[in-house]
Amino acid sequence: MKIEELEIDDYYAGFSDALSEGEKKKGLLIHAFQRIQKDHNYLPEDELRALSKNLDIPLAEVYSAASFYKHFYFKPRGKNIVCVCVGTACHVRGAAKILEKIEENFGIKEGETTPDLSVTLETVGCVGCCGLAPVVTVNEDIFGDLSPKKADKMISQVKGK
Amino acid sequence: MGKLKTLDDLRALRKSLEAGTFDPDVPRIRLCSGTACTATGTPGVLTALEEEASRKGIKVDIVKTGCQGLCQKGPVMKVEPQEIFYQKVKPEHARWLLDYTVIGGTPYRQGLYRESFLNEPIPEMTEVPFYKKQMRIVLRNNELIDPRNISHYIAVGGYSALEKALGSMTPDAVLSEVDRANLRGRGGAGFPAGKKWKHTKSSAGKIKFVIANGDEGDPGAFMDRSVMEGDPHSLFEGMLLCAYAIGAEHGLIYVRHEYPLAVKNLMIAIRQAEELGLLGDNILGSGLNFRIRIREGAGAFVCGESTALVASVEGGRGFPRPRPPRLSERGGGVWGYPSNLNNIETYAFVPHIINNGADWFLGIGTKSSPGTKVFALTGKIVNTGLVEVPMGITLREIIYDIGGGILGGKKFKAIQTGGPSGGCIPESLIDTAVDFDTLTAIGSMMGSGGMVVMDEDNCMVDVAKYFLSFCQSESCGKCPPCRIGSYQMLQILEKITSGKGEEGDIERLERIGVQIKESSLCGLGSSAPNPVLTTIKYFREEYEEHVRDKYCRAKACSGLGVFSIDHDECFLCGLCKEACAFDAVKETSRSFFIDQDYCTKCKACYLACPIGAVKIEKVKVKAKVEVKVEVE
């Protein structure tokens, strides 16, 4: 990833002068990770190496920042991301059963990816759709008010993709 | 629309927009396009409505609004001028809705809200019990305007507070108005915003930042989301007023990455505001410069803590640090510059305070906590969704009047407020008036405003374990009390809920909990034991039952109790036998029974039984027969 692609001027619009070069580069890190992940679905090592070189930040520091955040992944992820919400509202309305059902169906545990890279199963603290609990998101789509029975429908839809 | 150069330009623009935007002669449908309604089918309804309207050749103005609150019954919409409220709208309803309401002016009965089959439907939104007791200030625009259209916001009076402040108030006057209104931080702790602003203002240095904290990580809370998604300009206006009052030129909004729609709508809103000259240099000719940029989080709960948020904005690991220096001081904020950090909802209140005055605000709510508060009402309750109520309302009113009571007619057990940092409030305290101080007094807290209702099927020990495991996995690991302490507490809870609890475990939990509270570095650690401590305080007998009787009265924990089949109820379907992986369910010619030697108490049979004939009971302690052998 080139630094130019990160639109650094807009990112620091107005207070560019207030920061040193080093501060500006470091401040770009999370933004850059997000961009890389958008393109690759995860953070490949060579991209991070290139980033470290371009931004002049030691690779260890790059990894230190990236590994802190749950949202960044170092392994390739599936084409479809199935994300089960296990927030409070979903928990009290039975998210655990939904998760179990999905795990059984795809044969993977939470946090794993199917060998053919078609599905990655994850959990999230809360997607903010508590009104529809329990909720599962598939990529950008939200499936709400699930029961193990309704989950079947969702699963077959994912498998069809 | 060109760039607005003076206050008069804004006034003129508003005047023309007021007349032209929401024409009262055109029928209007305000369709909720919040995340929840979008998930339940808004896009389909929208196309159906549009197609049907063009087929019929009628003119109807469809406004895609932000979250209207009643997420449970989505997609919801309001038809004007009759003000008829529809819920659970389906694409096939579009035809009838247009025929009946838009053309005929009468309600379409099938789409109306009704409490149950037997009740008469309620056509007006204001009469629906969910909305009746609410007082919508921050959420006011959510049901009115399209968040992606700045002219809607201006047409309903948006940026008029900015106009008032720039036109007739000095920065100090704005600050003292907010201070006098005693606006307390809506993010959880309730620190007065005015004091924070003053503090930032008095810090040395020319460069200052205004930061809005939209890292709403509490599970079960989504009010900031609805403001960012549904009314982003009110947030900007609040930030602008803050910037004007404290002399800052730079704004940052920190949004968690789980909210893609919020980021999208904020970006659109920033662009529109910049095009109109409401953000940028020399705003409305006043000499005020202010820009807003967005920073996306990356899935770390602890980044909602102010010092961790700063570390994350600077591009590092989101570790909190000891205070002082506070954010408002030199050396404390982002890159060392004094920064004023408030919650999204707090900023959204500011324009209303400036417009209506501090006295108006003080007249709402309670003495120590004026104003309203948005709560996300969820859990085992009939009406889930966003509610905005004046402070001082009782929990009973929120649960029964607005929320419509407990789902499925079950018995209310507890309400959890304040997310993972808050506590569980039992039924005996349900008449508590909700404000910052009363909630803290009973061991819970306001938090960002999540309210999760629990019924008799929820085990309080399990709930406490759930919250603690959340905090434990979100602990950043910097300070040992939080990192190690929360892990130890979780281990004990794990033991208790799986039937291996010992005498003394409860006391141990209490002791560790208090120690973590006192010695943790940041708010995450110092509030993590709250759910455990409050549940022990109010539901100690449930803990004791788990430990002593190996019994879970909510039947939520597996590994506890004695399983048996009630032969009077059982109709011999055999599902329990199929479900059992350990062959513990035995069949005789006339009945099924559970062999206790094989039973692992996994609850598979209990869940499989369609009529609830599998019973879980307390372990019966056999009376000890003391045999006294008297030796003579």
Image: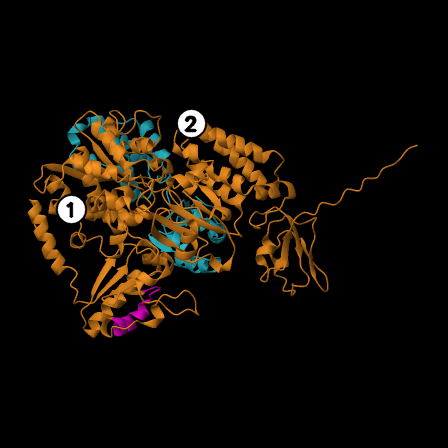
Q: Write down the quadrant of residue B580 in the picture.
A: bottom right
The colour scheme used here is by chain
Tell me which amino acid carries mark 2: Cys
Residue A15 rendering spot, x and y as whole percentages: 17, 32
Q: Position of residue B488 (x, y in %)?
A: 52, 32
Mark 2 is surrounded, within 10 Å at the Cα level, by few (under 14), some (14 to 19) or many (20 or more) other residues, namely some
- Magenta span dominant secondary structure: helix
In the figure, the shade used to draw chain A is cyan
Nearer-N-terminus badge (1/2): 1
Measured in 3D between alpha carbons, the distance from the residue under mark 1 to the one under mark 2, in whole angstroms, is 42 Å
The disc at residue B273 is: 1
Horizontally, residue A23 falls left or right of residue B484, namely left
Q: Give the SS element for disc 1.
A: helix
Q: What secondary structure is found at the residue carrying circle 2? A: loop
Q: Are discs 1 and 2 less than 8 Å apart at CB?
A: no
Residue situated in front as seen by the camera: B119 or B566: B119
Could you say which is closer to the camera, residue B365 or residue A27?
B365
At 42% from the left and 27% from the top, the residue drawn is B479
B189 shown above or below B610: above
Chain letter of the residue beneath label 2 in the structure image: B
Q: Quadrant of residue A10?
A: top left
Q: What amino acid is at disc 1?
A: Ala
Q: Which residue is mark 2?
A: B479
Q: Which chain is orange?
A: B
Residue segment shown in magenta: B86-101
